[in-house]
Amino acid sequence: MSSLSRELVFLILQFLDEEKFKETVHKLEQESGFYFNMKHFEDLVQGGEWDEVERYLSGFTKVEDNRYSMKIFFEIRKQKYLEALDRHDRAKAVEILVKDLKVFASFNEELFKEITQLLTLENFRQNEQLSKYGDTKSARNIMLLELKKLIEANPLFRDKLNFPPFKASRLRTLINQSLNWQHQLCKNPRPNPDIKTLFTDHSCAAPTNGARAPPPANGPLVGSIPKSAGFPPMGAHAPFQPVVSPSPNAIAGWMTNANPSLPHAAVAQGPPGLVQAPNTAAFLKHPRTPTSAPGIDYQSADSEHLMKRMRVGQPDEVSFSGASHPANMYTQEDLPKQMVRTLNQGTNVMSLDFHPVQQTILLVGTNVGDIAVWEVGSRERIAHKTFKVWDIGSCTLPLQAALMKDAAISVNRCLWSPDGTILGVAFSKHIVQTYAFALNGDLRQQAEIDAHIGGVNDIAFSHPNKTLSIITCGDDKLIKVWDAQTGQKQYTFEGHEAPVYSVCPHYKESIQFIFSTAIDGKIKAWLYDCLGSRVDYDAPGHWCTTMAYSADGTRLFSCGTSKEGDSHLVEWNETEGAIKRTYNGFRKRSLGVVQFDTTRNRFLAAGDEFLVKFWDMDNVNILTTTDCGGELPASPRLRFNREGSLLAVTTSENGIKILANTDGQRLLRVLESRAFEGSRGPPQQINTKPPIVALGPVSNVSSPIAVNAERPDRILPAVSTSGLAPMDASRTPDVKPRITDESEKAKTWKLADIVDNGHLRALHLTDMDTNPSKVVRLLYTNNGVALLALGSNAVHKLWKWQRSDRNPNGKSTASVAPQLWQPANGILMTNDTNDGNPEEATACIALSKNDSYVMSASGGKVSLFNMMTFKVMTTFMAPPPAATFLAFHPQDNNIIAIGMEDSTIQIYNVRIDDVKSKLKGHQKKITGLAFSQSMNVLVSSGADAQLCVWSIDGWEKKKARYIQPPANRSGTLAGDTRVQFHNDQTHLLVVHESQLAIYDGNLECLRSWSPRDALPAPISSAIYSCDGLLVYAAFCDGAIGVFEADSLRLRCRIAPSAYIPPSILSCAGRVYPLVVAAHPMEPNQIALGMSDGKVHVVEPLDSDPKWGTAPPQDNGAHPAISAAPSVASNQASDQPTR
């Protein structure tokens, strides 16, 4: 084709894409061979449309063209062949082998023979080269990376991977210009010339007076002619945006679309991958310096680096598709849909926010200016503040005048700071107030800011200068940043032309920025450099819009409603500044502005049509809905707690409904049981308020729990060891009787010492193995109905409790024996041993959050097993060095921290089979790993008795400390050391044969206990109970100790004779627990993995359902663990308040 024809094809391609003629676009791409659409190619490959993949490729190359082309076709056909084998479709595999792969036999006969031999294997992963083959989706993604490299290197694709830099809707513009030009000298010019007049030539004499007729208006095409300085608004033609050459910073990607002719960037529209961004440097020519901003030099080096990358672009970093997101294995059961609580606020609720650490504490703001803090578990309102101006004299005259004219005021937004120690409240008139919050419900006034003229519409917290700041926006069209402690103004951002509705701060690669939306539908983005907005886009709906990121900060969403009532929930492609997907399911005319929230990096929820509607983030169609039992307003407000186990929803009756999933219900049951136990305390506490329970995260995602039972896939229901009695001593009616009672209790208290099996329930799990090997790892499944043991011989055993007449709920219990489960194929779940002796290896194990997969190692490769079939899904990390500990990243199950025998820790991405980072700091093998999501750290322990803290963000070492020997032991400690975070995610249980110890986040030892008196033997294993109130420790003489978690005081000793059958005890040799596992829902049930290969389940009797009673406090008692260390706290619920 001629050059003119080539350019016309590009114009037509752009037009067709804008008009959404998808099939026609790609057909023209293929037939013309001018433009290879990598995004379309990726979609075809990921969808497994192999015939269409080859058909599209055929427009650009053939198998025999060159070695690159041959390799491209070979990889595609090989993947198609492996997928057929994976489906056990042998006939299809043979067809592909003969029809598609045989052509390559003449080039590499040996390879073709090896491929053919795969037909003889039951599972092609038995081939060593294919042992790392994962599931279909991940295999396609890995292949895509290789295909893209081959295509980019193939000379036949040169100049075909980039689309010419047309402006959006270029063909429309040219036709409009042509139409206008043709009628410009018309004797009788029409203001809207008919497009059909372009089908024939048109000529007309000039006006008789010689004057030029005024130019006609734009032609009646779908869109008007874009102004010379701008582009059509988003949605005028199609929702496509141009692919640019982005920097890795998402904000930079949005900014590279800036229009050099405007002070703020405008949307440049075009299909994905078809239009290149215009020059982006000119937007820097229009800085806006706030009149009152102090001269703060913020992140100048990083910002300058970012700006340089934005100016020049990076052609080698062109992204043809949105960021991929790891597949999550969540189901609808993970959504909180069961209504479990109703709270009566008494006035209309305007804003909600769950505490970021204490998962059941809810902040509420109302339409009369009140704020309240609720403890959802106990249904208690623990704090309440009515609106008042703290210092009317320091207020501006406009505020004083507004209050004099109309004293009514409403809360527009209330929310917690990231650590939950401060809460902020934005009001409908001028003011923002911040309070310091204590867990006992105490609210202390901190800062009152006269922030904006008119209403303050939204607030958010950020850390732009290493200190906490609060961002505000208001009716005066401004965005301001203030010091959250002092209320001093730090920045002012101007540029919106309408009241600013919402703000959304974020950061990428240490560059911090703020998205803002206004009620004219404009979206802008700001760096903290006072140079003006970097983005000027139109939000769908062009009215009230809020933006929010997913919990891991990788996905950006917005939800808004137009003045006409049309609601739009969308996901944005940050790199391109484009709408990635639009979610369906809103009613045609929403009654009010729709509110939304995100959770678990997986789900979206919005209130609409008197319902709560849920979406999977990767599916545009509604997942499910709930009406919460009725009484919802048309557009209810809603808010998830941090782990997504609870959802607060406003009602039309001035109340709040709390919905929960299984984790949330479990959490609330624990709270109820603690409240009940508190009611059984001393009589003088009867009139005190219900107990406040300090709560940490609850989730079934990857967990920081990693002590001996090694359960890195679970964050347990979080009940702090503090706060279980009334939090404020001032609530106790009289101090003297309490002191007297404490004294009496000290005299009468006695350690519970259980020595025979009549005082507990103990169950010995049946095992057909006549010569079992010692149990080195043991854990409960997340649902609590099965036990998984790993023996020193590298073989796993799984026991499941079944429903029966004696056990109708099928729950784990020491009263009914579980079944030793095995799949129908009869295979054993056996780890790779690398031809070594597994008895000498350090075993490790981790279970997926939905109990479907287990990851395990016994000195050889790490194996991933299917828990239903016991089949090996994949293996990786071949020794040396061998893996010694496994822990899932708390936010991404594809990322695993693997402790190694050579003392390193490898941060491994399973999906792409790549080691992201290698951490060095220990001198001996790694024996423990624990993540804290709230502190954003990984703590490691080793056989060198050293603890190390690593930042999750950059994986740099923050601190290291050796544990100290107890007073009765001298010399340097060595030996396996395990770590486990408490449910509050800030306190750390450290277990060594010489001691139990509690450390804080700075690795300061708060208290410790060493073997002595009733428990003199070395410690073999220890773990927190699921509610965080107890620590179970096993000893090398067979005894079990039950300790108070906050003080490490012994409350119960279980002798080996109480749970080990006499026939075993009488045999020669010492039998003791190597590992203790805590039940995930029943805090008083444990399982013990023994040195003789047996497994025992132990729990108290129904008549006395707790392990003894809490020991009395002495004068030198340590303070209890609290999720907020700065707040005074108390002992467990069955003790009097201190």
Image (cartoon, rainbow, N blue to C red):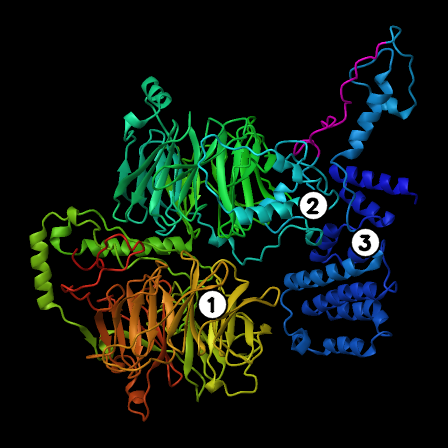
Q: Nearer the viewer's eye, disc 1 or disc 2?
A: 2
Query: Which residue type does callout 3 highlight?
Result: Tyr
Indicate the quadrant where residue 106 lies.
bottom right
The circle on residue 21 is none
Q: Position of residue 221 (x, y in %)?
A: 77, 26
Report the predominant secondary structure element of the magenta stretch: loop
> Is residue 389 or residue 69 the one in the foreground?
389
Q: CA distance from mark 1 to mark 2?
A: 37 Å
Mark 2 crowd level (few <14, some 14–19, many ≥20, 10 Å Cα): many
Q: Position of residue 233 (x, y in %)?
A: 66, 31
> Which residue, given by chain and number where applicable, does mark 3 sit on?
56
Residue 486 falls left or right of residue 506: left
Badge 3 element: helix
Q: Position of residue 808 (x, y in %)?
A: 38, 64
Badge 2 element: loop
> Which residue, given by chain and number where applicable, does mark 2 sit on?
243
> Which residue, given by chain and number where applicable, does mark 1 sit on?
887
Q: Which residues are magenta?
A: 211-237
Query: Which residue type does callout 1 highlight?
Result: Ala
| Point 55% across, 51% down: residue | 554
Badge 1 element: strand
Q: Nearer the viewer's eye, disc 1 or disc 3?
A: 1
Residue 532 falls left or right of residue 100: left
Q: Earlier in the sequence, mark 1 or mark 3?
A: 3
Q: Is residue 26 visible?
A: yes
